[in-house]
Image (cartoon, rainbow, N blue to C red):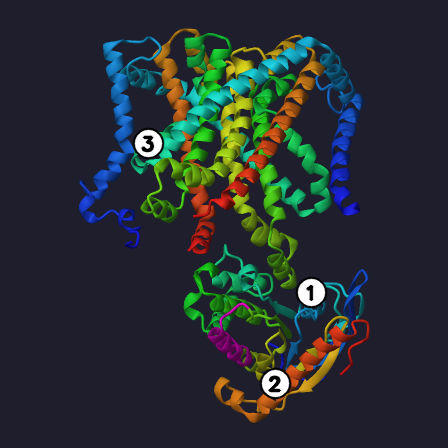
């Protein structure tokens, strides 16, 4: 029992120790308490914020942008990824284009998005979708391409129709990859959502943070950073839970469909 | 019922090749890009869209903008900050990672804390650190380090943790010193994970470089592109987008080369295991 | 290299060695000595705690009681004058280094470059791998990898060479070659060898003495002298009637050890 508890206790100790150190540094003066408010002030500010409806509305805005962007990117990436992944000719001919476009940082497209779509959510969605798309697309490609050619040809030669092959062979093989892609995509989508809020000014945590910074409410800035971190952790946790559920189901389903 | 013929489709016979191999490869590499470029040029001629200028105008703007003084005022400092930031992030990440990964209690103490820091979306570090560090070069580099260090650090910890117990025992029984163990056992063993972490941090560093220059800055690539957008200089803006894309690609290629060099043994090992 | 002409006093002394994990006693009372230049095999049924014993002797595991002495000094950590060859050769060689580099590694701090080069070449020759110096371990077969591990141990010039079932994961033909390699190395370089195995024939073929272990709580069931000729080879030695007698005897001892353990787990197995 003790062995299982030890990492949890130590982990908590680490976080508390860090907070204590920070508190000390800010109050004693190792860092400028004005620019780096002590944790007590930050958590007080955070507490106040949670009572403000605007805070929750802001988080909601971020989540909406994130969700829309992730969904659009997901649908596009799964569709394109599957089609291209299944047809070797398409795979070969799109490879150079993919390798060229993929490393382009999404932030580079921000000015274009602003020009075309203004300073609202739509512009943000462009960069969110662009970056997230690649994450899911690449994983889908790998997943679909990972299908065992011998299994595929065996099924083909036994006359199993393409749709059935897709459901019982391609999908199970590709599913773990796709889930990984979605998990990575979820993280990237949040990062670009926040970026859009910071630079384009879309409503959300990023924009609220900029406002607080301008108003010299530094405790507010820090508490929004903490908020964003917690939000990211929660999203990550949820996606992992979903991933585990789906893959567990998939494993049990797959076990029955061995060919 | 005859036996199913499985293998026929798996190997293309020499006769099914219409073109010599080198031409095939070349076509695959530039086929689609050329078509896309052609479509863009065609649409620019037939129905000009002010947001999507013709490719030749962009090329012209590219040369005009970046080949010249802007190279030294914007590109070099931007890249400089990026590379310095990355260098620090890599050194710090690996050094700390080895330390934390080697001591179980230290890892259990710090890992949750680090995981939280890693979870914070890196772009938020720009306004956050601007409060303390201002908006100069130092601030921008600090931002890059603060964002890019986490994947490297956490991956190094994992890699160090996963060092094979048998190899450790071998090293110990052959009296290898701690320094020798780190250099000849721990670092090479963790190298695959470390390189994966570095790959992640490359894109984070690039994003942070651009964002830190788009806000509160008066020079640098991010600033320039925003300037062009605000002043409706669209071909110039596009040339900036393309330049950033080229930088991203160059980083990716350089990383690939480095990875092949550092992990040559690892690829060979995996090939053998797969066989 | 150890001096072959030094007096044959006890080099390695194991007395009353005991290892327990909580309530479970693996090693109860292990005592034996090895003189300089001896080749001793340790056999026992599966689960006897052979690897535990080896790790205690090699200083990789702290015993719960008793002592291990090498050259009169207590062993508390891996001693300098000992080298270990593990069963999992694939995991003990470093895949990012060439064969040559792997063999060289323990010598980096102790031996100057030119001397190192020569020594490495010499041992690679001795194990028959002079052509493989610049290859990577994963490019070699299992048997060759184990040869590299042996070469590395020999280059280290230990007084005692410990081998933990090194040929268990290797096919029978390769094993025969490697057994002869061990005897060759032993005679050429004059090391003291403690060779752990579960293969009875192997233990009789190789050893000057065979120590048979019981089941846990493990003691030395028998410390048997192998009075086969000093010159041995796979064909003739294994055909000798004396070989068959000895191996049958050892087999009987191991069966007895297993039976005793099943019959009365609390009773101590009979000492040698």
Q: Determine which residue is flagged by label 1.
A: C78
Q: Is residue B183 left or right of residue C63?
A: left
Q: Chain of mark 1?
A: C
Q: Is residue C82 left or right of residue C29?
A: left
Above or below, B37 against A138 in this view is above
* Figure quadrant of the N terminus of chain C: bottom right
Q: Which residues are magenta?
A: C169-184
Q: Nearer the viewer, residue C82 or C214?
A: C214
Q: Secondary structure at mark 1?
A: loop
Q: How many numbered tags mark residues here?
A: 3
Q: Determine which residue is flagged by label 3.
A: A94
- Residue B132 lies, in percent from the top left, at 66, 19
Indicate the quadrant where residue A59 lies.
top right
Indicate the quadrant where residue B151 lies.
top right
Asked whether the beta carbons under mark 2 and mark 3 sit within 8 Å of each other, the answer is: no
Residue C247: image tag: 2
- Residue B192 lies, in percent from the top left, at 52, 45
Q: Secondary structure at mark 3?
A: helix
Q: Chain of mark 2?
A: C
Judge depth for marks 2 and 3 and give the one in front: 2
């Amino acid at each position: 029992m003790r062995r299982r508890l030890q990492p949890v206790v130590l982990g908590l100790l680490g976080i508390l120790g860090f907070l204590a150190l920070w508190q000390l540094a800010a109050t004693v003066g190792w860092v400028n308490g004005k620019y780096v408010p002590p944790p007590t002030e930050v958590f007080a500010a955070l507490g106040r914020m949670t009572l403000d409806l605007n805070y929750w509305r802001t988080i909601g805005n971020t989540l909406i942008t994130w969700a829309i962007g992730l969904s659009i990117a997901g649908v596009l990436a799964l569709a394109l990824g599957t089609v291209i992944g299944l047809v070797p000719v398409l795979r070969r001919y799109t490879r150079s284009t993919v390798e060229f476009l993929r490393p382009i940082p999404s932030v580079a497209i921000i000015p274009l998005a602003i020009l075309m779509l203004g300073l609202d959510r739509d512009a943000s969605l462009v960069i969110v979708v662009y970056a997230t798309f690649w994450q899911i697309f690449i994983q889908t490609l790998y997943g679909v391409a990972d299908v065992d050619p011998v299994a595929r040809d065996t099924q083909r030669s036994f006359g199993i129709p393409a749709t059935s092959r897709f459901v019982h062979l391609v999908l199970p093989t590709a599913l773990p990859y796709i889930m990984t892609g979605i998990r990575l995509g979820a993280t990237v989508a949040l990062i670009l959502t926040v970026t859009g809020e910071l630079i384009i000014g879309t409503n959300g945590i990023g924009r609220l943070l900029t406002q607080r910074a301008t108003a010299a409410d530094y405790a507010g800035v820090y508490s929004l950073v903490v908020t964003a971190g917690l939000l990211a952790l929660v999203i990550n946790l949820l996606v992992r839970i979903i991933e585990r559920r789906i893959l567990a189901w998939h494993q049990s389903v797959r076990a029955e469909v061995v060919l | 019922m005859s036996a199913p013929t499985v293998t026929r489709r798996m190997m293309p016979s020499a006769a099914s090749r219409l073109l010599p191999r080198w031409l095939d490869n070349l076509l695959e590499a530039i086929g689609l890009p050329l078509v896309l470029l052609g479509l863009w040029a065609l649409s620019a001629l037939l129905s000009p869209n002010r947001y999507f200028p013709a490719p030749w105008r962009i090329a012209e703007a590219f040369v005009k903008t970046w080949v010249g003084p802007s190279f030294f005022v914007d590109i070099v400092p931007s890249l400089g900050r990026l590379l310095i930031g990355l260098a620090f992030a890599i050194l710090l990440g690996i050094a700390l990672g080895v330390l934390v990964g080697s001591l179980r209690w230290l890892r259990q103490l710090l890992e949750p804390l680090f995981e939280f820091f890693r979870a914070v979306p890196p772009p938020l570090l720009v306004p956050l650190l601007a409060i303390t560090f201002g908006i100069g070069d130092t601030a921008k580099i600090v931002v890059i380090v603060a964002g890019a260090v986490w994947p490297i650090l956490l991956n190094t910890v994992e890699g160090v943790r996963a060092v094979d117990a048998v190899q450790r025992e071998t090293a110990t029984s052959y009296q290898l010193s701690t320094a020798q163990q780190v250099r000849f056992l721990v670092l090479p063993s963790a190298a695959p994970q470390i390189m994966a972490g570095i790959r992640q941090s490359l894109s984070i560093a690039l994003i942070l470089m651009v964002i830190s220059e788009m806000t509160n800055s008066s020079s640098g690539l991010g600033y320039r592109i925003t300037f062009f957008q605000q002043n409706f200089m669209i071909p110039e803006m596009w040339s900036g987008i393309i330049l950033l894309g080229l930088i991203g690609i160059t980083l990716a290629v350089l990383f690939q080369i480095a990875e092949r060099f550092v992990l040559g043994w690892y690829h060979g090992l995996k090939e053998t295991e797969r066989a | 290299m150890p001096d072959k002409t030094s007096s044959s006093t006890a080099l390695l002394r194991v007395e009353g060695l005991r290892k327990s994990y909580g309530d479970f006693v693996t090693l109860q009372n292990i005592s034996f000595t090895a003189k300089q230049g001896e080749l001793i095999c340790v056999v026992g049924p599966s689960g006897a705690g052979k690897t535990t014993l080896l790790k205690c002797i090699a200083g990789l595991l702290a015993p719960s009681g008793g002592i291990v002495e090498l050259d009169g000094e207590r062993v508390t950590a891996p001693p300098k004058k000992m080298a270990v060859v593990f069963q999992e050769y694939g995991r003990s060689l470093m895949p990012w280094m060439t064969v040559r580099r792997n063999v060289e590694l323990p010598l980096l701090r102790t031996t100057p470059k030119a001397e190192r080069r020569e020594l490495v070449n010499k041992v690679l020759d001795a194990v028959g791998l002079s052509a493989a110096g610049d290859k990577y371990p994963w490019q070699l077969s299992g048997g060759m990898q184990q040869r590299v591990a042996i070469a590395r141990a020999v280059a280290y010039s230990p007084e005692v060479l410990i081998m933990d079932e090194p040929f268990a994961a290797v096919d029978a033909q390769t094993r025969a070659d490697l057994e002869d390699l061990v005897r060759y190395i032993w005679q050429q370089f004059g090391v003291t060898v403690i060779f752990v195995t579960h293969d009875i024939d192997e233990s009789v073929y190789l050893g000057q003495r065979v120590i048979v272990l019981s089941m846990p709580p493990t003691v030395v069931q028998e410390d048997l002298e192998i009075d086969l000729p000093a010159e041995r080879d796979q064909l003739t030695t294994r055909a000798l009637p004396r070989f068959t007698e000895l191996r049958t005897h050892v087999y009987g001892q191991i069966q007895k050890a297993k039976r005793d353990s099943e019959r009365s787990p609390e009773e101590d197995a009979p000492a040698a």
